[in-house]
Amino acid sequence: MDNYICKLSENVERSHVRYPNRYGLVLAGDLYTARNLDKNGKAPAVVVGAPYGGVKEQGPCVYANELARRGFVVLTFDPCYMGESGGEPRHVSSPDLFSENISAGVDYLGLLPYVDRERIAALGICGSGGFSLSAAAMDTRIKAVVTASMYDMSVAARLGLTPEQIQQRKEQLSLQRWEDAKNGGPEYIPSFPETAVETVPDEMQGIWREFFEFYATRRGHHPNARGGFTTTSDLSFLNYALNDHIEEISPRPVLFVVGEQAESRFFSEQAFEKAAEPKQMLVVPNCNHVDLYDDTSKIPFDAIEKFLRDSLR
């Protein structure tokens, strides 16, 4: 399976592609199409963004596999500085660059002769939910947005911190820049082991246990997705609000999909409140945050397909 976490449908074709974002960084992607797709026609398309710290072989392949089977042309990708995509030093994260990666996918899809440029949507899982919303607020070519277990990384950077603690964090990260300059490269401390493990530490609880159960075990482990980014990447998120302009996506529609039991549910609820109509919220029963990465018994593909078809008419 080449480290893909789900088996490719016999009715779907997957091909590896490469294309640049507007900063000239080359992204590595996978293009999914139904084997019986009429390439003389014009199909709707979706660019799928991975969870923050994830790569195309994880959650995105689950969504792409299913949506391609249903007739959509689907593009997944490794974010710049990650996986097989370009960018040095590795594991750098930026809210602007990661939102730009979504628009770069629209660039690529819109050049395919069998894709309808007026019917391209973005689907973002976890952190890419926030990046997809941010991209759509600026990029009017994105005609609809779906988020699954949306995480706003710019909100998360300040979450629960007092003004004094935020100042301390800025001081710590600012001084780290001198350490990085002295060492000739940025500090990177991965969150997950290099090889998959069988057990989760008992002391790890809540959403961090969910993340470990996915990224560190055979369920979702990938050597290119060990979690975390360069330490000073957090400076950008402290200084950049991803979804200040979310209401400007309207009149293009947004669907927020969230697990009933997800600790991250409040991110979707806050964004839903701020977004303008048309908007929908779909709460999946008996579902946590990470279930929407890969659990096809819980991911509401019928509802997602209906939303996309209605939105991309």
Image (cartoon, rainbow, N blue to C red):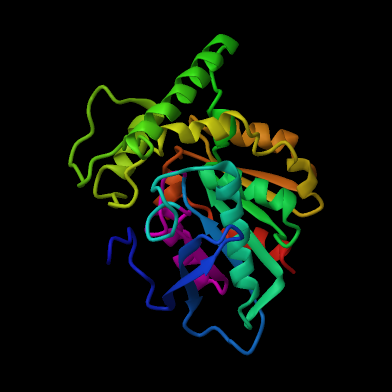
Identify the residue shown where x is 56% and y is 9%. Answer: 164
From what the image shows, is residue 39 above or below residue 297?
A: below
- Answer left or right for 7 relative to 70: left
Q: Is residue 292 left or right of residue 46?
A: left
* Rendering coords of residue 9 (x, y %): 39, 72
- Determine whether 63 is above or below 16 in the image: above
Q: Position of residue 100 (x, y in %)?
A: 61, 53
In x, y percent, where is residue 183? 33, 34
Give the quarter of the image for residue 265: top right
Q: Residue furthest left?
A: 198
Q: Determine if the magenta segment contains residue 132.
A: no
Residue 261 visible somewhere in the drawing: no
As rendered, which of 287 and 39 lies closer to the eye? 39
Q: Is residue 24 above or below residue 43?
A: above
Residue 55 located within the stretch drawn in magenta: yes
Quarter of the image holding residue 3? bottom left
Q: Which residues are magenta?
A: 52-80
Image check: 282 left or right of 311? left
Total numbered labels: 0
Q: Position of residue 82 (x, y in %)?
A: 41, 52
Q: Residue furthest front?
A: 182
Query: Is 11 located above or below residue 244 in the figure?
Result: below
Q: Residue at x 42, y 27 (%)?
A: 178
Which quarter of the image is occupied by the N terminus? bottom left
Q: Is 17 displayed left or right of 38 in the figure?
A: left
> Could you tell me which quadrant the C terminus lies in?
bottom right
Q: Residue at x 48, y 72 (%)?
A: 32
> In front: 263, or 75?
75
Q: Is residue 15 visible?
A: yes
Q: Residue at x 64, y 38 (%)?
A: 242
